[in-house]
Every structure is written in C-alpha cells, then in structure tokens.
Amino acid sequence: MKLTPEKLAPHLAKSLAQVYLVAGEEPLLMEESLDAIRAAGRKQGYGEREVFDVERGFDWSRVIEACGSMSLFASRKMVEIRMPKGPNPGRGKAADEDSGSAKSAKSGKSAVDGAKLLTEIAQNPPADVLLIVSAGKLDYRQQKAAWVLALESAGASVYARPIAPERWNDWVAQRMRSAGLKPSADAVQELADRAQGNALAAKQDIDKLLLLYPQAEVGVDEIRDAVADSSRYDAFGVGERMLMGDAQGVAHAINRLREEGLDVLAVLGPLVWMLRQWAQVQGHFARSGNASRACSEARLQTARIPAFLAALPRTRQTQIYGWLRQAALIDQLAKSTGGKEQAWEELLTLSLSAAGRRVVRPMGA
C-alpha cells in the first residue's frame, strides 16, 4: 500500500499495519508521519521501542535478534530501523578494523545483507512486532527495489515529497488554520514568503503565532512582530539585497550570519527559493519586455516588487539558471565532510555575482 503524508492519518484511524516504510525529501512531513505511526502503535499496545541507526559497518544480526526476542516490558514492541542511505550490506567488526585484509573480505561477504533481510522480514513479519523503516530520498530505481516492494506489500509506505512551489501558499494557509489561527490572505503571503519553502521554519513560526495569538485574527503586522529573526541579517534579507544589487550589503550580511554560527544550508535554502522565483519572473520579462507586467504575472507580493524591478533589467534567465546550478554544488559541499567552510565561500561568490559584482577568482582556485 502506498500512502502520502496527508492520507496517513485516515489510514491509521481505520487500522494499523504491521510494517511501515517512511521515506522522502521533506524532513518535517517524514518526522510527523513517523510520530503518527508511533502514537498509533502505542495505542495498540506496542509499549517498548527499539531503535537501530544504520551506518557504515552496521551489524544487521542485531535486527534479527530484536525481531525474534520477546519484549521484557510489554507484550508488543516497535522495532525502528533508520537508514539515511539505504540498507547496504552489513560488515563485521573485523571488516571495519582492517578492510584490506583477506579476513575482512570474508567477514564482509558473510555479514548479513540488509536489503535481503528486510525483504525476508516483510515476507514473514514477526508476531507482536511493529516494524518501522525510515529512509531518505529514494530515486525511481530504489523505489522499485525488492526490499521496498516487499515492505509495501506487507504493510504500507509513506513517501514525503517536497512541497511544490505552486502549492506552497495553500500548504501554509492550511497549516495555519489547522493550528487554530485565523490568518488574512496577506498574512499567509507574508509567512509563505518569509519561510521560503522551508516547511520546518514555517511550522516553527506557526507555533510562535499560536502562542501569541490563539484563536485571534492574524495579519501582516502580527506576522512581522512574531516571526522577525533575532539576527539583523537573515537569509530573506540577503535575497532582497541580491535583487537590489547591494553587493556590499550582501557580503556584510553573509559574513554576519557566518560569524553567528548559522548553518550554511539555513541560508542557502531561502536563497534557492528566491532564485527560482527570480528565474520565473525573468522569463515573463523576457517575453514581454515589461518589468511591472512580469511581476504581476508572477503574482509577486506588492512589497517585493521594487527589488525585482531593480533586478530584471540587469540579468538574464540563463544567468539565474547558472546560479541555481552553483547552489546545487554548494549544497553538496555543505553536506560533505569538512566542506562547510568552502560552502560559505562559494555562497558568498554566488551572492556577489547575483548582486551584480564581477567576482574574479585567484589563479588555481
């Protein structure tokens, strides 16, 4: 059975499967789905929870033991397997210590194959065990893997896809109303613009609003008062400075955010969202030659139009696509071991380029 995060709650209200796979690209929706499954499991008497984090060298025999052993504290238990990179074959202790030796090679071959084990468990789920498997992004080929299909057949899979840009405002509005807020249309737009596609940031801001204005009307002023960043130079402000061509302001803002210890990905995410919108508006401008009309066709918030009017005449859509490709490389750098410092430097280069300053790299850089 395949489910979306939105369809999980109705499913759990009717029945609880014995096996679940939760994967995807939107961390907030994944975590909320996992929380819902755990809560449903507790209601059904799964009182104990055993969690395994699959990393390099993971011993899959521990999962076999967990699924086969009786719970010490409850008649039923949850076994949760968290795999950010998929069920790679396990490796024994000797393999970790000396991967180049014949002994380690033998150990690697004899170790339990994670994908095969998950397939076998799904085909014959252990009694009184609720198996919850979570993974990260699965590409098309991975979604057709035997272990994925086996888990889906034994129970259900929930895949959390990114919230599409065209659905973003509606998603924010729905979350605000579900929380008990009564937002105006402008308030929804303001929060949607500030969160810039970051679902977790939007949820945190909604939680703040709920504490400050429970069951009350929420307008733009309330949004700005409640969700203003503690930092003077937030990522949203960097994007505005890029559009306005304020290279000096961009450099100062990024350096300030870096000094304050902000994660580079927390800055990159909103900038990528803004660049995508920039590319869309630039496309309208290329067709009509009228900047005001392009902003109107893209349905920009009134307060943001002046920044785009300043940016459109000096840029081309191909440039923006180039910055987006550069942003993808920065994302990879930021997620690699020891790459965060270089990611900050590359982000500064990108931002200065987008602000209109020609960046000359030193020889060999």
Image: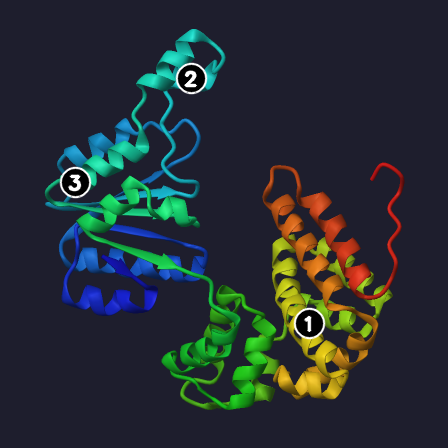
Q: Could you tell me residue 124's position as x and y percent? A: 13, 39
Image quadrant in which you'd find residue 82: top left
Compare residues 16 and 229 and report the one nearer the observer: 16
Disc 2 from disc 3: Cα separation: 29 Å
Which mark is drawn over residue 144? Answer: none
In the figure, is residue 28 to the left or right of 239?
Answer: left
Q: Which mark is nearer the camera, 2 or 1?
A: 1
Q: Tag 1: residue type?
A: Trp
Image quadrant in which you'd find residue 39: bottom left
Is residue 243 in sight in this rendering?
yes
Q: Could you tell me residue 362's position as x and y percent? A: 89, 42
Query: What residue is shown with label 2?
Result: 95
Above or below for 128 versus 184: above
Q: Residues within 10 Å of mark 2 (few under 14, many from 20)?
A: many
Q: How crowded is mark 1: few (under 14 residues within 10 Å), some or many (20 or more)?
A: many
Badge 3 element: helix
Q: Could you tell me residue 347's position as x and y percent? A: 73, 54
Of mark 2 and mark 3, the one earlier in the sequence is 2
Task: Check contact, mark 2 vs mark 3: CB within 8 A.
Answer: no
Badge 1 element: helix
Which mark is drawn over residue 123? Answer: 3
Query: What residue is shown with label 1?
Result: 278
Residue displayed at 40% across by 62% down: 29
Q: Could you tell me residue 264's position as x and y percent? A: 65, 53
In the figure, is residue 84 to the left or right of 314?
Answer: left
Of mark 2 and mark 1, the one earlier in the sequence is 2
Q: Tag 3: residue type?
A: Gln
Above or below for 66 versus 247: above
Residue displayed at 47% across by 77% down: 172
